[in-house]
Image (tube, rainbow, N blue to C red):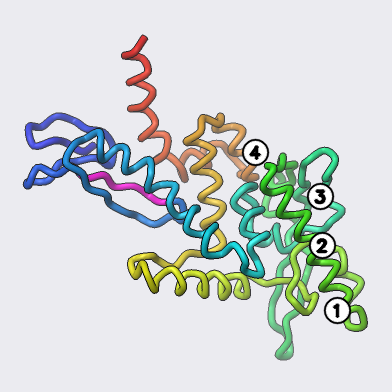
């Protein structure tokens, strides 16, 4: 619990430096620790609110036209694991009901110098789930469907029947892989770092963290967050995102004071 110079408790992640400036530490939307500074406590709280949404804005601007942008959007708006996204098929997407069904993961390993793909069951029983789609995720999937059809036409002779129904594929209509997505994200990171060298490398899993953090910050019930993430227990969800709920406690108490 942070304190001011006179010993007053300020809240989790908040403190006052010897020079009088207030500082706020937080975990940003990609799971990275950051610190903001301001002359007053209210200013630093406002900066915290603004900064915690900055990463998504930067990503949307810089990665807008990249090959895997549609995957990024679906990841950040559903909280799906990268393996679940790799294994997502068009039969899992219900555009009419605006939901996506998580039924499997696609895993890969090297054998005799080649990558071999295998369908695996979801990580846990709870991982089999149905996730409502945001308008943004719906649009991304519609665009991806058009792109997928174009890719399939270009690679019709070499396309494998087993993977023709995959939502996210490579330019050669092969199943996508985590390291390929990571390489594309690294390209985006390097573009950002040209103007913002402090921007840190992030991974596909960060989108899942973003989804959960945003959901809890916006008042979603922890049990609902657990179901959407496919966690085996509520305790796991709360342990991972307790930093969000702790910070929210102070906002809730201020609401009580206003009554």
Locate residue 230: give its quadrant: top right
Give, as a single range, the part of the protein colored magenta: 23-28
- How many numbered marks have been drawn onto this rendered protein structure? 4
Q: Is residue 162 left or right of residue 101?
A: right
Which residue has dot 1 on it? Answer: 154
At horizontal 73% and vertical 74% (from top left) the residue drawn is: 170
How far, Cα to Cα, is label 1 from label 2? 13 Å
178 or 46: nearer the viewer: 46
In primary-sequence order, the first of circles 2 and 3 is: 3
Q: Nearer the viewer, mark 4 or mark 1?
A: 1
- Tags 1 and 2 touching, CB below 8 Å: no
How far is the residue under mark 4 from the one under mark 1?
A: 39 Å
Q: Secondary structure at mark 4?
A: helix
Asked if marks 2 and 4 touch (Cβ < 8 Å), the reply is no
Q: Residue furthest bottom?
A: 113
Q: What x and y, as percent, mark residue 135?
A: 69, 43
**Mark linked to residue 146:** 2
Q: Which mark is residue 93?
A: 3
Q: Nearer the viewer, mark 2 or mark 3?
A: 2
Q: Residues within 10 Å of mark 3 (few under 14, many from 20)?
A: many
Which residue, given by chain and number where applicable, does mark 4 sit on? 227
Binning the other alpha carbons within 10 Å of mark 2 as few (below 14), some (14 to 19) or many (20 upward) gives few
Mark found first going from the N terminus, 1 or 2:
2
Per the model, the C-alpha gap separating discs 3 and 4 is: 18 Å
Residue 129, position as x, y percentages in the image: 73, 43
């Amino acid at each position: 619990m942070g304190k001011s110079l006179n010993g007053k408790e300020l809240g989790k992640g908040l403190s006052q430096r010897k020079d009088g400036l207030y500082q706020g530490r937080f975990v940003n939307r990609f799971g990275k620790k950051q610190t903001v500074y301001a002359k007053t406590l209210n200013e630093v709280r406002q900066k915290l609110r603004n900064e915690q949404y900055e990463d998504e804005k930067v990503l949307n601007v810089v990665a807008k036209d990249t090959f895997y942008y549609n995957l990024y959007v679906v990841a950040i708006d559903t909280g799906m694991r990268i393996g679940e996204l790799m294994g997502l098929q068009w039969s899992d997407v219900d555009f009419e009901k605006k939901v996506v069904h998580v039924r499997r993961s696609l895993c890969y390993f090297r054998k005799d110098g080649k990558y071999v793909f295998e369908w695996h069951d979801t990580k846990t029983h709870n991982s089999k789930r149905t996730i409502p789609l945001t308008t943004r995720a719906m649009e991304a999937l519609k665009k991806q469907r058009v792109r997928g059809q174009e890719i399939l036409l270009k690679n019709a002779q070499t396309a494998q029947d087993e993977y023709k129904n995959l939502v996210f594929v490579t330019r050669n209509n092969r199943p996508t892989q985590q390291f390929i997505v990571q390489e594309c994200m690294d390209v985006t990171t390097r573009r950002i770092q040209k103007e913002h060298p402090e921007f840190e490398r992030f991974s596909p899993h960060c989108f899942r963290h973003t989804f959960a953090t945003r959901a809890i910050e916006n008042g979603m019930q922890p049990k609902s967050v657990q179901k959407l993430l496919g966690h085996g227990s509520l305790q796991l969800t709360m342990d991972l995102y307790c930093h969000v709920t702790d910070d929210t406690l102070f906002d809730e108490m201020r609401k009580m004071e206003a009554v």
